[in-house]
Image (cartoon, rainbow, N blue to C red):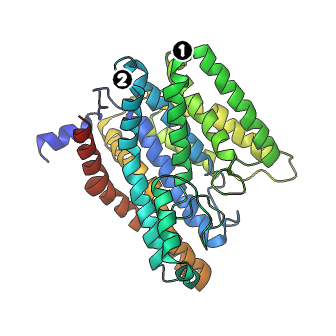
């Protein structure tokens, strides 16, 4: 190993302005992304039944992403206003996020067209698929395609949360960054009340990705994203617990894997998820922000952080083919398990290759063009 490679492993990455990354938070984003992939691998062949699902609350991982996003955006940009315009901020966010949005949409269209296990998909006119691809590249929702449940973004379902991320970024650029800490806390309290009401009514946070519950998406984003912004403002006043990436990852996985609360306990599931979203996740983010880790854990966090966004944005088109194999061919359970394990490995390799060969070069090129 040469000196440059060794230094890259043991030293934290830096932001565009030279600030060190919160490496533990990057690692936790990777943990949550893996949880989402495993949740989908387990849920797809059983049509999202809870029987056979071991990550019962993994839908909360998206809310954890929103909270992390608010925290790191405040860290990266709060001090730059005055030297940076709204247009420059939005351009920077587009460069960071949109290349993988486009790649996810293209992979989703390819997956839909070449899937060998779902003959009914081949009956859809190519013009319809191209229209949906164009809308997907713009992150806009579109009508449901066959074998895609009722997703608002049928070609690549995780894109629904990126649409909400963009809305949160716009709210930050135009309004939220201007608020004082108390006013931001008041906004967080209001959004928490709305989300609590929805959790009380629906008894589940799993809403927003489909046409039957699309209105839940902005409620989820509004609370967690604002909470992340507010946490950054008050981080120095909080107790400085330093648990590290491994311990915090275990805590997250336990929270995602807790069994569903029985229906005999009214509103119990929603109340548990409210506890996780509004108390546990903020504590995990603050602990991660304050944690200091050694070189081995740092290297793992850097890898997890780098692969997290490609993994989240690109896994679904691959898993849809796996899903249709399981649902249409109905193979034995052992075969489904093997196909799921193989799909996980394919997704991991494809995500890393996409990061190194597509995302990094494209973003570097766009940054040069912007300068």
Q: Secondary structure at mark 1?
A: helix
Quadrant in which the C terminus appears: top left
Q: According to the image, label 2 marks what residue?
A: 84
Residue 370 in percent (x, y) is at: 26, 37
Residue at x 49%, y 16% (from the top left corner): 236
Residue at x 70%, y 42% (from the top left corner): 273
Task: Judge whether residue 331 can be spotted in this image.
Answer: no
Q: According to the image, label 1 marks what residue?
A: 237
Which of 150/352 is in front?
A: 150
Task: Judge whether residue 101 can be spotted in this image.
Answer: yes
Whole-number angstrom distance, CA of label 1 to CA of label 2: 28 Å
Residue 342 in percent (x, y) is at: 44, 72
Q: Secondary structure at mark 2?
A: loop
Residue 219 in percent (x, y) is at: 67, 39
Residue 147 in percent (x, y) is at: 61, 73
Which of 181/239 is in front?
A: 181
């Amino acid at each position: 190993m040469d000196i440059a490679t060794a230094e890259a492993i043991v030293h934290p990455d830096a932001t565009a302005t030279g600030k060190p990354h919160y490496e533990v938070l990057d690692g936790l984003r990777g943990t949550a992304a893996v949880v989402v992939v495993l949740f989908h691998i387990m849920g797809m062949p059983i049509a999202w039944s809870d029987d056979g699902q071991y990550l019962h609350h993994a839908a909360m991982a998206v809310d954890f992403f929103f909270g992390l996003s608010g925290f790191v955006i405040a860290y990266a940009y709060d001090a730059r206003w005055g030297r940076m315009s709204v247009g420059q901020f939005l351009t920077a966010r587009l460069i960071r996020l949109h290349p993988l949005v486009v790649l996810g949409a293209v992979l989703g269209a390819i997956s839909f067209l070449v899937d060998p296990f779902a003959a009914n998909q081949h009956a859809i006119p190519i013009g319809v698929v191209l229209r949906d691809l164009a809308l997907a590249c713009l992150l806009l929702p579109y009508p449901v395609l066959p074998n895609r449940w009722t997703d608002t973004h049928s070609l690549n379902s995780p894109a629904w949360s990126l649409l909400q991320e963009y809305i949160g970024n716009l709210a930050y650029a135009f309004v939220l960054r201007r608020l004082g800490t108390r006013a931001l806390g008041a906004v967080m309290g209001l959004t928490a009340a709305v989300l609590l009401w929805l959790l009380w009514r629906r008894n589940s946070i799993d809403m927003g990705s489909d046409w039957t519950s699309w209105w839940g998406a902005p409620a989820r984003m509004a609370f967690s994203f604002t909470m992340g912004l507010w946490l950054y403002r008050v981080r120095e006043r909080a107790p400085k617990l330093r648990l590290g990436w491994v311990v915090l990852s275990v805590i997250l996985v336990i929270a995602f894997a807790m069994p569903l609360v029985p229906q005999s306990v009214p509103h119990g599931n929603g109340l548990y998820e409210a506890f996780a979203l509004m108390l546990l996740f903020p504590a995990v983010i603050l602990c991660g922000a304050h944690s200091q880790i050694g070189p081995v854990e740092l290297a793992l966090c850097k890898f997890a952080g780098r692969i997290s966004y490609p993994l989240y944005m690109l896994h679904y088109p691959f898993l849809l083919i796996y899903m249709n194999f399981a649902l249409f061919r109905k193979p034995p359970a052992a075969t489904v398990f093997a196909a799921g394990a193989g799909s996980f490995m394919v997704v991991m390799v494809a995500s890393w290759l996409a990061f190194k060969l597509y995302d990094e070069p494209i973003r570097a090129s766009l940054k040069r063009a912007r300068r």
